[in-house]
Amino acid sequence: RLPTVEELAYLLCSFAANDFSIWDPLLVGLGAAVYPIGALLNHSCEPNVVLYYHQSSHRQEMRCIRRVEVGEHLCHSYIDVAAISEIRREKLKSVYHFDCDCERCCQPPHILDERLKSVACDQKQKKDEDDVSRY
């Protein structure tokens, strides 16, 4: 039996929320894949794990990026942790349909957000200046 339109839509939505981008060593996107163990990990804006893709074996590896205490959940970031709080929250809500309640998001906007905004403004200004100097 073939799946119904509703069943296909459900599967596609599930895939979109649980797939992983596959990148080459130069961070060029190659596609997406489902890794059931990786999909069990929750999100944190202060992750303790990063996910690594082995291009030759097509396996996903979890690498701890800080000390993990006994009983602590392994979490990776679904989004760019360098983004300011507002952008992170918007992305998580629009793509993954939840409000983040990790420790970093439960804090008032941090001075780091102001620094990130400053860097982004500096980069935009430099790009604008480069664009003008071409003419």
Image (cartoon, rainbow, N blue to C red):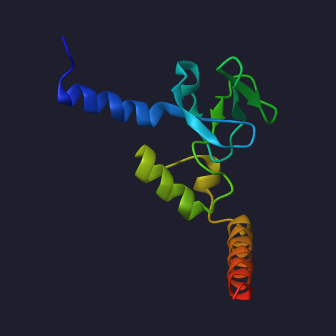
The percent coordinates of residue 11 (x first, y second) are: 33, 27
Q: Nearer the viewer, residue 6 or 46?
A: 6
80 lies left or right of 48 = left
The percent coordinates of residue 54 (x first, y second) are: 71, 24
Q: Nearer the viewer, residue 74 or 122?
A: 122
Q: Nearer the viewer, residue 37 or 75?
A: 37
Depicted 72 relative to depicted 16: above or below = above
Depicted 35 relative to depicted 101: above or below = above
In the displayed orientation, state which residue is furthest to the top. 1
Q: Nearer the viewer, residue 58 or 36?
A: 58
The percent coordinates of residue 13 (x first, y second) are: 35, 35
48 lies left or right of 33 = right
Q: Residue at x 20, y 16 (%)?
A: 2
96 lies left or right of 44 = left
In the displayed orientation, state which residue is furthest to the front. 135
Depicted 1 relative to depicted 110: above or below = above
Q: Quadrant of the C terminus?
A: bottom right
The percent coordinates of residue 59 (x first, y second) are: 66, 19
Q: Residue at x 70, y 82 (%)?
A: 125
Number of numbered discs visible in the structure rendering: 0
Q: Residue at x 70, y 77 (%)?
A: 127
Q: Residue at x 49, y 54 (%)?
A: 91
In the displayed orientation, state which residue is furthest to the right. 67
Res. 20 image quadrant: top right
85 lies left or right of 135 = left
